């Protein structure tokens, strides 16, 4: 497992554990997150978004089905259960030269 894949795993562990402090250390100041419902731009906005999301969800169960990386991007197939409701997600996570997350693109299905 290379360093990007290790950081990607950390990201998902911190997200699953609702650990805002550690998540924020992984984010580039100008991070962009886009999923099928949201477009969040900037580290502070993403932290605020996650705090609000975590307040709405009691239990997060996340399983990594497949994780690969190429150059400065990791690709991860996930199975996520939010309060018992399952969803399949594909995340494309791009890193900067300091291995901070600068872009997350999440696809449902």
Image (cartoon, rainbow, N blue to C red):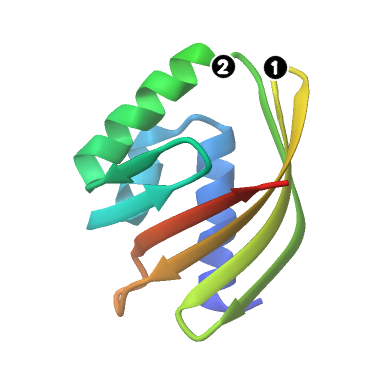
Instruction: Identify the residue position indicated by label 2 in the image.
Output: 57
The residue positioned 36% from the left and 43% from the top of the image is 39
Q: Earlier in the sequence, mark 2 or mark 1?
A: 2
Number of marks drawn:
2
Residue 84, visible in the rendered structure: yes
Answer whether labels 2 and 1 touch (C-beta < 8 Å): yes
**Can residue 28 be seen from the camera position used here?**
no
How far is disc 2 from disc 1 in space, using C-alphas? 6 Å
Residue 74 screen position, x and y as percent: 56, 70
Please give the label number shown on residue 26. Answer: none
Residue extending farthest to the front is 36
Residue at 24% in and 46% down: 43
Which numbered disc covers residue 83?
1
Mark 1 surroundings: few (<14), some (14-19) or many (≥20) residues within 10 A: few
Q: Nearer the viewer, residue 63 or 49?
A: 49
Which residue is located at x 30 percent, y 80 percent?
97
Q: Left or right of 34: which side holds 70? A: right
Depth check, front residue: 55 or 24? 55
State the SS at label 1: loop
């Amino acid at each position: 497992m290379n360093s990007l894949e290790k950081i990607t795993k950390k990201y998902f562990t911190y997200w699953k554990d609702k650990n805002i402090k550690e998540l924020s250390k992984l984010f580039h100041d100008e991070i962009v997150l886009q999923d099928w419902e949201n477009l969040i731009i900037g580290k502070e906005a993403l932290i605020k978004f996650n705090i609000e999301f975590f307040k709405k969800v009691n239990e997060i169960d996340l399983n990594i089905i497949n994780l690969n990386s190429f150059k400065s991007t990791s690709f991860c197939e996930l199975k996520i259960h939010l309060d018992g409701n399952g969803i399949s997600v594909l995340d494309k996570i791009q890193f900067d030269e300091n291995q901070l997350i600068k872009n997350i693109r999440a696809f449902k299905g």
